[in-house]
Image: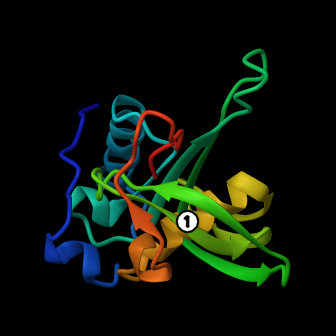
Amino acid sequence: MSVLNIVTTPDPVLRRKAHKVTDFGKDFQQLADDMIETLRDAPGVGLAAPQVGILQQLIVIEYGDDDDESVPKKLFVVANPEIVQRSEDLVEGIEGCLSIPELIGSVERSRKVVVKGLNRHGQPVKIKAEDWLARIFQHEIDHLDGILFTDRTDKVWQPTEEDEVPAD
């Protein structure tokens, strides 16, 4: 496994649409493993393939309860993710991004989402997410469409020591 370089703004790859994954072979498996290692090294909570310069619809998310360290983090590797349902209940929250390291912002997102996609072996998965996990999925799926969190808000600022935000 390798730690990949994270692309930062204004690199144009961050604004391009990613292509669907059709081959789940050795190269795809290596990319998934490398993205997981890169996410953990950053550290972050989510990473989309365009953020490492690869225009494939692949996201990795590793999320756990910060209040309860005894519960292991859950790892999601999802190809071709699609939000098939979202709650009308919107919540504003602070987001950061590994590709925009100098800024954070307050973004309004659906509190609950249902995501369909394929796992790393090409098998269908359906994930019901709410609160912070739902926010992470929405943020990462936006990356696959060339959308950055800064496109979704005008409330953006440079973080200070008081700002606690997991990146991406």
Identify the image quadrant of the N terminus.
top left
Q: Residue furthest left?
A: 11
Q: Name the residue nearer the viewer: 168 or 78.
A: 168
Q: Are there few (<14), some (14-19), or many (20+) residues within 10 Å of tag 1?
A: some
The residue that appears at 15% across and 71% down in the rendered structure is 10
Q: Position of residue 79 (x, y in %)?
A: 51, 65
- Looking at the rendered structure, the kind of residue marked 1 is Ser
Q: Where is residue 144 in the image (x, y as percent from the top left)?
A: 41, 75
Q: Is residue 161 rendered to the left or right of residue 95?
A: left
Q: Decide: is 122 above or below 81.
A: above
Q: Name the secondary structure under disc 1.
A: strand
Q: Decide: is 144 above or below 54.
A: below
Q: Decide: is 99 above or below 30.
A: below
How is colour applied across the structure in the image?
A: rainbow
Q: Decide: is 78 above or below 143.
A: above
Q: Is residue 22 rendered to the left or right of residue 73?
A: left
The residue that appears at 40% across and 48% down in the rendered structure is 32
Q: Where is residue 48 in the image (x, y as percent from the top left)?
A: 40, 60
Q: Position of residue 2 (x, y in %)?
A: 24, 33
Q: Quick check: can you spot residue 92?
A: yes
The residue that appears at 32% across and 40% down in the rendered structure is 34
Residue 113: quadrant of the picture: bottom right
Q: Report the number of numbered marks.
A: 1
The residue that appears at 23% across and 50% down in the rendered structure is 6
Q: Is residue 119 rendered to the left or right of residue 20?
A: right
Q: Is residue 163 rendered to the left or right of residue 113?
A: left
Q: Quick check: can you spot residue 123?
A: no
Residue carrying label 1: 106
